[in-house]
Image (cartoon, rainbow, N blue to C red):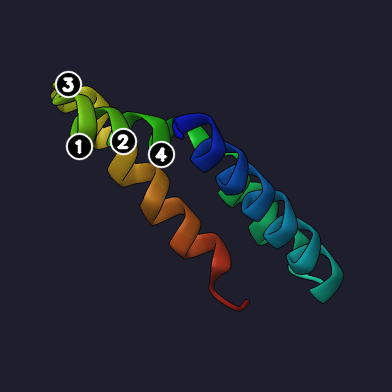
């Protein structure tokens, strides 16, 4: 069951990547796809109750702020 959920998630991610590439938002898509370590860290915190050090929390926050700033129109 977990493998099926992971496969559907991967399929959805690839589908949205292709759709966003076709719409011309490739710079934003590239930045968002580079955030997969952040998503992994957050999921580990939520489901496995792993602790994130203050330095890692700051990295997550800075990465999210960076994505927001990049996605703003020039």
Left or right for 68, reference 51: right
Compare marks 4 and 1 and give the one earlier in the sequence. Answer: 4
Can residue 30 be seen in the rendering of this structure?
yes
Q: Quadrant of the C terminus?
A: bottom right
Q: CA distance from mark 4 to mark 2?
A: 6 Å
Relative to residue 44, is residue 73 depicted above or below? below
Across and down, in percent, residue 7 comes to: 61, 39
Label for residue 39?
4
Which residue is tagged 3?
50
Q: CA distance from mark 2 to mark 1?
A: 5 Å
Which residue is tagged 1?
46
User: Which of these two is toward me, 12 or 59?
Assistant: 12
Across and down, in percent, residue 27 comes to: 72, 58
Q: Residues within 10 Å of mark 1 (few under 14, many from 20)?
A: few
Left or right for 58, reference 1: left
Q: Which element carries disc 4, helix, strand or loop?
A: helix
Q: Which element carries disc 2, helix, strand or loop?
A: helix
User: Which of these two is toward me, 36 or 2?
Assistant: 2
Label for residue 43?
2
Q: Residues within 10 Å of mark 3 (few under 14, many from 20)?
A: few
Quarter of the rendering containing residue 10? top right
Relative to residue 37, is residue 39 depicted above or below? below
- What residue do we see at 45% from left, 52% from top? 66
- What residue do we see at 77% from left, 67% from top? 19
Can residue 27 be seen in the rendering of this structure?
no
Is there CB contact under 8 Å for labels 2 and 1?
A: yes
């Amino acid at each position: 069951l977990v493998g099926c959920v992971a496969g559907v998630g991967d399929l959805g991610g690839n589908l949205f990547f292709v759709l966003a590439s076709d719409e011309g938002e490739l710079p934003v898509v590239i930045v968002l796809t580079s955030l997969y370590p952040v998503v992994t860290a957050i999921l580990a915190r939520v489901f496995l109750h792993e602790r994130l050090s203050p330095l890692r929390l700051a990295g997550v926050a800075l990465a999210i702020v960076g994505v927001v700033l990049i996605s703003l129109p020039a």
